[in-house]
Image (cartoon, rainbow, N blue to C red):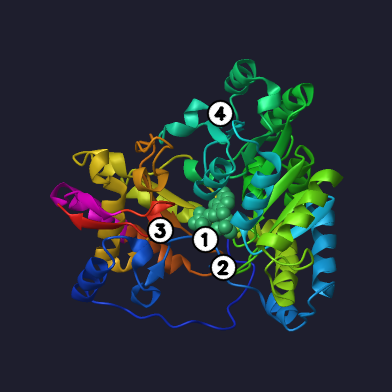
Amino acid sequence: MKKIKQSWAEPYKIKMVELLKMTTASQRQKAMKEAGYNTFLLKSEDVYIDLLTDSGTSAMSDRQWAGMMMGDEAYAGSRNFYHLEEVVKNIYGYKYLIPTHQGRGAENILSKILIKKGDIIPGNMYFTTTRLHQELAGGKFEDIIIDEAHDPENEFPFKGNVDLNKLEKLVKKYGAEKIPYVSIATSVNMAGGQPISIKNLKELRAFTKKHGIRIIHDMTRVAENAYFIQQREKGFEKKSIAAIVKEICSYTDGATMSAKKDALVNIGGFLAVNDWDVFEEARNMVVVYEGLHTYGGLAGRDMEAMAIGIGESVSDEHIKARVGQVIYLGEKMIGYDVPIVKPIGGHGIFVDAKKFLPHIPQENFPAQTLASEIYLDSGVRTMERGVVSAGRKANGENYFPKLELVRFTIPRRVYTQAHMDVIAESAARVYDRRNKIRGMKMIYEPKYLRFFQARFEKL
Ligand code: F0G
């Protein structure tokens, strides 16, 4: 008998739909020009399929919506805060919780508490907001991810791993007392959603323990990382996503979370720590920047939706379909010879713009150019993750990252397989006419996180 393939499928059905506007090529030309060729500046109404980000764009479940109605909007001591606190303790294992309006709110508070001027913060690749908060607090980020992560074609299964030799060199050079913590992201966003292994985390824990250095976990996409551990790491095949998530967290001392991703909510985040002293300071500081320590910038209903979303996010069926859809899109693109980062990551497809448009030098923003071309072709909105996102160093020079990527980020539980087909075909069409595409120049540059608001002109 022939072996029949076992496909993934969504563990839910659709109860309500949101109608989309379809645009013509000339409408898109006009919209893109008005947006200064920056997909962040497009109006969402002019977008057909929105792959700008998986952040805050997921579809909530009927249970989450029901939870919204159970919001306790008291200024202090909301019931929903205690529910969230219990969920964070039970599912992730962290002792103390500070809610924040989103991930960067937690990054701000944590950086201000732990970083002193002149400190070094090693991490497995930078993330835009995370690094900026480290720098604003007086620290300097140092990349300690393995070299494989900077090579889009290297198929190493755990490209989020830390190179312990790089870390050891930093400890020797600066001394452990200059390193307040190692910043570890699960599902490393800028590397293409690449996971870190349990084995690597355990080794890192042993090393940092020896030197008295904390590990702070950017757990924004921890469940997706857990899925890759379950699929790829020896000894974890039979473990549940929930068990793997908890084990990952157990090797770290605290976490910042943008709940807008894994946790299936449109807004929210938190800081979670095991150290009473850090918690106490954070609880003092949150009232300055976010709100009282039992709401941190969120409504009671937001905390309730987050508490329920966290539970749904660690279900095996959910994650299998979630990552399954991303892999489906990636394999389709590979089928059309579109150059993408491999292995396929957890939250989106990252197209290698240097390889896609080899005739455009990095100074002329190949990834930014490609993102605008994809929109012009089909109304699909993607995001630049290359030289524009990388920004400038403290001395004003541009960072020129090895990876010059366009991210096709998939919101959770939002689009269908047919949408994935349309997206892959659009990428293929643009690839077919790649030789005719010219680069761009930047005509407006904001001081911080320039990718959000920069404007461009075609050359
Ligand atoms: N850490 C990671 C790994 C992220 O991907 C993000 C946000 C943050 C922290 C900051 O969280 O947005 O809630 O303040 N990433 C979004 C993205 C913006 O599109 O990748 P936030």
Q: Can you say whether 140 is above or below 96 in the image?
A: above
- Measure the alpha-carbon separation of dots 4 and 1: 26 Å
Q: Mark 1 points at which residue?
A: 54
Residue 376 image point, x, y percent: 25, 65
- Closer to us: mark 2 or mark 4? 4
Residue 269 image-quadrant placement? bottom right
| Displayed-image quarter of ligand 1 | bottom right
Give yes or no for contact between labels 1 and 2 (Cβ–Cβ under 8 Å). yes
**Badge 4 amino acid:** Ile
Give yes or no for contact between labels 2 and 4 (Cβ–Cβ under 8 Å). no
Q: Does the magenta stretch include residue 442?
A: yes
**Badge 3 amino acid:** Phe
Residue 265 image point, x, y percent: 63, 68
Q: Name the residue under label 4.
A: 144
- Measure the alpha-carbon separation of dots 3 and 4: 26 Å
- Measure the alpha-carbon separation of dots 3 and 2: 20 Å
- Which residue is at a point 49% across and 33% down the rendered structure image? 149
Residue 58's label in the rendered image is: 2
Q: Nearer the viewer, residue 138 or 374?
A: 138
The magenta-colored residue range is: 426-444
Give yes or no for contact between labels 4 and 1 (Cβ–Cβ under 8 Å). no
Residue 452's label in the rendered image is: 3
